Every structure is written in C-alpha cells, then in structure tokens.
Amino acid sequence: MQKPPTQEQEQDPGGEHAEITTPKTWAAGVPAVEHAMTYSLSQTTVRRTGLTLLNMNQTKGFDCPGCAWPDPEPGHRHKNEYCENGAKHVNDEATSRRIDADFFRRYSVTELGRASDLWLNQQGRLTEPMLKRAGSDHYEPINWSDALGLIADELRGLDSPDEAVFYTSGRAGNEPAFVLQLFARLLGTNNLPDCSNMCHESSGAALHETLGVGKGDVSLLDIYHADLILTLGQNPGSNHPRMLSALEENKRRGGRIVAVNPLPEAGLMRFKNPQKPRGVIGGGTPLADQYLQVRLGGDLALFQALNLLLLEAEEAAPGTVLNRPFIDAHTSGFEEFADHIRSSVSWPEVLAATGLTRQEIESVRDLVLDSKRVIVCWAMGLTQHKHAVPTIREIVNFLLLRGNIGKPGAGACPVRGHSNVQGDRTMGIWEQMPQQFMDALGKEFGFTPPAKHGYDTVDAIRAMRDGQVKVFLGLAGNFVRATPDSEVTEQAMRRCRLTVHISTKLNRSHAVCGDTALILPTLGRTEKDMQAGGEQFVTVEDSMSQVHASHGRLEPASNHLLSEVAILSRLGRRTLGDSAAVPWEQFEADYGTIRDRIARVVPGFENFNARAVRPGGFGLQNPVNEGVFRTASGKATFSSNAFQSLPAPEGHLILQTLRSHDQWNTIPYTTNDRYRGVHGSRRIVMVNPDDLTALGLPDGAKVDVVSVWRDGVERRAEDFRVVGYPTARGCAAAYYPEANVLVPLDSVAETSNTPTSKGVLVRLEPRI
Ligand SMILES: Nc1nc2c(c(=O)[nH]1)N[C@H]1C(S)=C(S)[C@@H](COP(=O)(O)OP(=O)(O)OC[C@H]3O[C@@H](n4cnc5c(=O)[nH]c(N)nc54)[C@H](O)[C@@H]3O)O[C@H]1N2
Ligand SMILES: Nc1nc2c(c(=O)[nH]1)N[C@H]1C(S)=C(S)[C@@H](COP(=O)(O)OP(=O)(O)OC[C@H]3O[C@@H](n4cnc5c(=O)[nH]c(N)nc54)[C@H](O)[C@@H]3O)O[C@H]1N2
Ligand code: SF4
Ligand SMILES: [Mo]
C-alpha cells in the first residue's frame, strides 16, 4: 500500500524542486484556457467538463463556486462566462474520483493527519457518512440516522449551549446558512464564527461605523463607468479573474486605474481577454496607469497623505476640490478630521511607511483631481492588518471628501472572497447580529433568541483551547488550516469531545479532530438536489449584493449524499423536535418554505421566492445609494485615525501570507504559481534582492522563517527556500496555509479581531 505524501514532502523541503522564472507581466489569454482544460480533464471526463462549464454563471445554471465576483446582466453574458480559475474550482468539485469506506480502512487518522493538503484534496469526493469513535484511529461507516442521533445526543447533553460552536465557510448557500443560524439560536447560542472573521470583517466593521452598512455600494456598471479605480491589496488575476474583464471595459471607456500592491502582480498590469479575439491574438489591454509598490501596511499612511494633499489643494483653490455641498448635507466630523490630518501627517513618516516617493503620491492626487467618479477596490491586503479598520475608515474619508459615495461610477468596493460569504452574513451567520434581526427571527419562530454575543473565529479557538467548547460543527471549510497559529488551533480542535464536518472533500480538519469525529458528505453546488418536494435550488448573494438562484446540473457524486439543508434540517428535528413554528421536515422537502421565512425575517427579501427565479435574480438596495446613512448621527461619518505603520526592525522583515494562482484557499491544486514565475514548490519565501543582500543571505538559501511576537513563543516554519523577488523593500511573502503557523492567535486587527495574516514580523534563520 502506498503511503500518502506528507505535508513536508509535498511542499518540497528547502524548495529543492523550485524552478523560478521571471514573473509574468500580463494575465489570462490562451494559456489560461489551456491550463483550465488540462486541470479539468485531469479531474473528470470531457462530458462532465462540458456539462459543468457551459452551465456555469448562466441564468438557469449554477453559480460558480469560486469567488464572489458578480455576473453581467442576463443577455450580456458570454457563453463561457467563467475564468480559468473558476473552471478549476468547479472541476475540483465535479471530479470523478471518489473516497469510500475502504479508503478509510486503508489510512489511519494519524496517517491522514500527516498527509499533505494537496494529496487529501486530490483523493476525490466524500461519498458516505463516516464516524471516528473516541479512542479509535480509523473512520468507519455510519448511517445518517445514527450520525445525526449522535450529534443530537451530544448537543442535548451539554451543560450550556455555549459549549457548542457552529462554523460556516462562505461557499454554503443562503438556505442552509439560514437554517444553521436558526438551529444554533434555537439551541440557545450565538456561537457562529465564519470565514468572514478572517476575511472582510475589517471592511464590514469600518463601513458599518462610517456609512451605516457593512457592504460595498458599487455595482458592475459603476466599475465600467468610473473615471478612476484604485485597486489595493488584491490580486485579481488569480483571485477574481473576471474582474479583469470589468477593468478592461472601464479602460475601453477611458477610465484610469491605479494599482497599489507590494508585489508586481501580473493581472494588474496587462490583461489578454480569452473571450475576445483581440485578447487572444493581440497584446492585450494595459491595466494600471500607475503602479505603486507600497510597503506592507502602508496604505493608511498613503490615504492620509492623499487626504492631506486634497485638503491643501482645496485651500489653494477654494471651492474647486472638495464637494462642500455633499460634505455639508450628508456627513459629520469633517472639521475634526481635517484638523487631525493637517496637524498629524508627517511626510517623512509617510514615505517610510509606504516606501513610495512624494512624487508618486502626488501623481495619484492629480489623477484624483482629474476624475469626477472614483472607486476604491480592496481585498485581503488591506483587511488582514492590525490597523485594517482605520485604513478602511481613511479610505471612506478619501471618498467622502469629493462626494464619491452613493453616486453612479463611484464608491467603496470591498471585493469579497467566497461565492456566498456576503449572503451567509445577510442570513444571520454572525456572532453579533443586530437586535432588529434577532427580534424578527424570534417573532417568526416563536422564541427568544439568545442575547449574549457569541464567539467569532479567534475567540472560538481560544475557548476550544481552554476546554470551554465540547462540540464543533463546520458547515463547509477547513477550520484548522484556515485559522492562524496552526499548532495552537490544532490542539484546540483536538480538545473537543465531538467534531462534525459537513464537507464535499477531504481536508486536514477531518484528520485533526475531536475525540469523536464525524464526516458528513454533502452535495456540491454543481449537483442536482432532489427532495420530497421535487428538484431544489439554493440562492447566493455576490460581492455587489445581487441575489440569484443556483441550480445544480450534475448527478450527485454518490447516492448517499444529503444536501446541506437536509443534513441541518434533520439535525434540527432530531435535536429539538418538529413543531408548527419550526417545521424542519417541510424545510427539507421544499426550500421555498425556508425562503418564505427569510422573506419575513431579513429586510430586502420580500417576495423572495418569486424574485429569486427571475433571470439574474434581484439586487439588494444599499441605503447609501439613496443618501441614507444608518450611522449613529444619521450621516456618513468622517473619522480621525491615528497614524500606524508596520516598520521592521533591523534584521527583520514583514511577512504576508497569500494565495498562489493554483489554489482555493486552504487547498493547493498544484505546486505552481504561474504568474509569479514559481513552479514546483510552495515552500518558498519571496524577499526583495536588496533585503537579501542586507541580510547577508544568498538567493536560494535555505532558511527557517521565525515569527517574532510579544509572547516570546517561538513560531517556526521550517526549511523554506529564499527567492529573490521584486517585492517592496522590507517585505516578504509566503503561501497560505503553509505559513499560518507563523501568525500568532493574539495578533489581530483592532475592532474586527481578524488575524493579521498580511503583517507578521519575522526573521530568516539560515539552516546549517
Ligand atoms: N483562485 C483563487 N481565487 C480566490 C481564492 C483562492 O484561494 N484562489 N480565495 C477567495 C477568497 S476567500 C478571498 S478573500 C479572495 C482573496 O483575494 P486577494 O485579497 O487578492 O488574495 P491574497 O492572495 O490574500 O492576496 C493579497 C494581495 O494583496 C497584496 N497585499 C498584501 N498586503 C498588502 C498591503 O499591506 N497593502 C497592499 N496595498 N497590498 C497588499 C498582496 O501582494 C496580494 O496581491 O480571493 C477569492 N478568490
Ligand atoms: N494565513 C492566512 N490565513 C487565511 C487567509 C490568508 O490570506 N492568510 N485567508 C482567510 C480567508 S480570506 C478565508 S475566506 C479563509 C478560508 O477558510 P475556509 O472557508 O474555512 O476554507 P476553504 O479552504 O475554502 O475550505 C475548503 C473546504 O470546504 C469544503 N467544501 C467545498 N465546497 C463545499 C460545499 O459546497 N459544501 C460543503 N459543505 N463543503 C464544501 C471542502 O471540504 C473543502 O475541503 O481562510 C483565511 N485564512
Ligand atoms: S471570476 Fe470568480 S466567480 Fe467568476 S468564474 Fe472566475 S472564480 Fe468564478
Ligand atoms: Mo476570504
């Protein structure tokens, strides 16, 4: 019997097999399509590949299970309305490979716990419920009824419902998410951590405070029509590839783009559109007019400097720069903010924090002054820092100054990650839902929802570590790999009495588990969902608040799979019993009955069932676009933010942990990162060549990456290869999740409690 490759082997200790080529300066185009097809065909058949890809992002098909980038209006969709990476994500789910009971007889849990993320995922789809009994080192088959009975008994036996934690990853559709949060709250807990806590929580927190809604106010049409788009802290060429088509459209109409990123990301420089002949043959569209290679964590300083320059320009030519009527009518806190910026911004500090020149920043100001409609887009490069929330608040200040909020072609655009992460939050997956939601939920289902806020992801890990959590249930996701401080998190997970994962594919969280562990295999987005009430669909909400249906098309990977809704409804029934108020059985039979409830509980979902099936679905109104700000003052709020940056003391670097082109979050598909010119290895750390010289390290040196944190605990990622790379000075980059071991659990963003995955202080220790 063949042993699975271990994490270390697969990731290539010391980067021995790494082949480094020059980073690419353009993204997409023909190679992208070829790569997608090669990966798809290695996973499944030509017929299934055709069936999946042609139904993807079409009005009667399924929503891409990849990122949350919106689809164009119905009628304006390409027949191949997907990107290279979307094709990979969908075929990773639609794979023909299967894991059966025999697989779990062959491999012990210990062995699976040593296997690489890549190998675990490559074994194929989970096909039947599996149980690991306490004390056993093997999973064995269990039937659905016994599995759900076991969970129900465990939950009913808890001293307090707060000893249970219910995690959600953003791939789950609206209906299962709504049922899960209802179940948790009926049980009596708000312990509903989600992947958003590690993702755009900082955006939600900052936008909520300043604009009154934790979501962006920009649509796809706004992107097309903006005069200027600033994109910060994101790598759309790999992570939101169809965003490049939207940026291309913006350029075609004469818009301009500024990219702010420590790395020279290919997708931000030039785009060859594989869906247009000129993209395939020609040289493509240059995207960024200006590329600022900012230092990690330098964006707050950058926006404070820009805001100062705008205030100064207004003083030089009063009445021409700021939108005074907008500021006077719709905002509060302007004078205090302006005084703060004028008195606190120091150019030497700004230049040190950003690593940019004053000329670079002034030329962005010139572009801003030349633009009537400005959009700022951002993703993880902004949200996963200690000062992420003040940074995003400062972006809001920047937009408010010229009235770039709530009007066409302008606004704030947090580019969401998982395809339904925004929808899950709308459905109530949050440890601190507003009272209005809780009241409506209680009224609809005849109970009093728990008042006490629950655990978010970081607090859940702390509670698990401290033995305060007995049951962990995950709806999708890979908790132990997604979370920071891997060793601490793994210990925390192992302390649980029972861990349950509702999953499509095998991952490390199934092997690093509680005393008793269950794997509950479920239908994926691509699959037909037949229930007593006929064929069902789910709904999702994209990054721009468009809600629409997603219909699975493929035959399920196994006859033993249940849908997420079916699993959760049956669990609800087993634990709490059916009642007139909460008819679990009906929910399972007909998801329309869940949508009827959502329509009565969640604002904006009136007449949900009828609107969900319209081609293209419907948009949730953002009150900001009607000039309504649900903040304490009833106005959009300027904020005064203390200057912060991430200086690295001598001999140290600031490390960001990021995604390669060939992975979906915790799951690497291959060991390549094509656009960045990295092939065959994920155990590398990218460092500016001048920093290597200063550190006395040759390119290619083998090092341990050691993180430095105030608790003095040594966190070490062993045997990485140093790669000289044109990133900003003082900065380094390594792949997530391999580098998560370096992110201290207590190193979190202010207010949002998001792990600081893009700002870890490290030193590189040469290996002898
Ligand atoms: N193919 C693919 N697509 C995905 C995902 C995936 O794993 N694979 N994941 C999905 C999810 S859940 C999410 S949240 C998104 C993530 O999408 P991204 O945010 O694009 O993902 P990351 O790889 O974390 O990249 C962070 C980017 O920010 C830059 N950056 C880091 N720190 C800073 C900083 O301090 N300032 C600035 N200005 N830039 C910085 C990095 O150089 C990098 O380009 O993608 C979604 N789409
Ligand atoms: N260091 C570091 N850490 C990070 C990040 C970072 O940039 N750096 N990014 C953070 C971010 S932005 C995010 S969003 C999180 C992601 O964290 P998660 O969302 O928890 O992780 P994923 O890797 O997306 O989860 C993959 C698993 O989901 C399951 N799955 C896939 N599709 C389905 C489905 O349809 N239904 C069900 N039930 N299961 C399914 C499969 O079993 C698969 O193995 O990680 C965070 N962690
Ligand atoms: S851009 Fe995102 S949603 Fe669109 S096809 Fe690609 S991965 Fe899927
Ligand atoms: Mo994310």
Image (cartoon, rainbow, N blue to C red):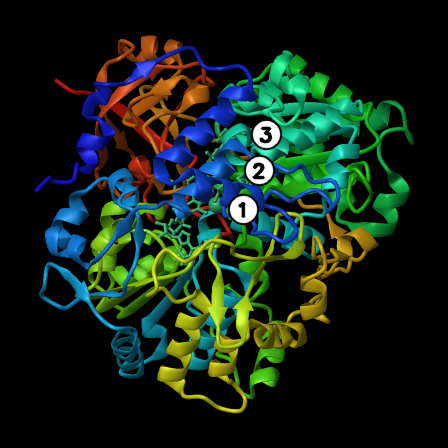
Up/down of 481 relative to 573, above or below: above
Any part of residue 132 in sight: yes
* Mark 3–mark 2 distance (CA, rounded to whole Å): 37 Å
Left-right relation of 535 to 373: left
Residue at 22% over, 47% down: 487
**Please, what is the three-letter code of the amino acid marked with disc 1?**
Cys
Any part of residue 753 in sight: no
Would you name the residue on which mark 2 appears? 82
Q: For the residue carrying disc 3, how many other residues have a C-alpha within 10 Å: few (<14), some (14-19), or many (20+)?
A: many
Q: Quadrant of the C terminus?
A: top left
Residue at 80% over, 57% down: 628
**Please, what is the three-letter code of the amino acid marked with disc 2?**
Tyr
Contact? badges 2 and 1 (CB < 8 Å)? yes
Would you name the residue on which mark 3 appears? 301
Which of labels 3 and 2 is toward the front? 2
Where residue 613 appears, as percent x and y from the top left, is 68, 62
Report helix, strand or loop for mark 3: helix
Left-right relation of 143 to 164: left
Would you name the residue on which mark 1 appears? 64
* Mark 2–mark 1 distance (CA, rounded to whole Å): 8 Å
Sequence-first disc among 2 and 1:
1
Q: Is mark 2 within 8 Å of ligand 3?
A: yes
Q: Is mark 1 within 8 Å of ligand 3?
A: yes
- Which residue is farthest front? 47
**95 or 586: nearer the eye?**
95
Sequence-first disc among 3 and 2:
2
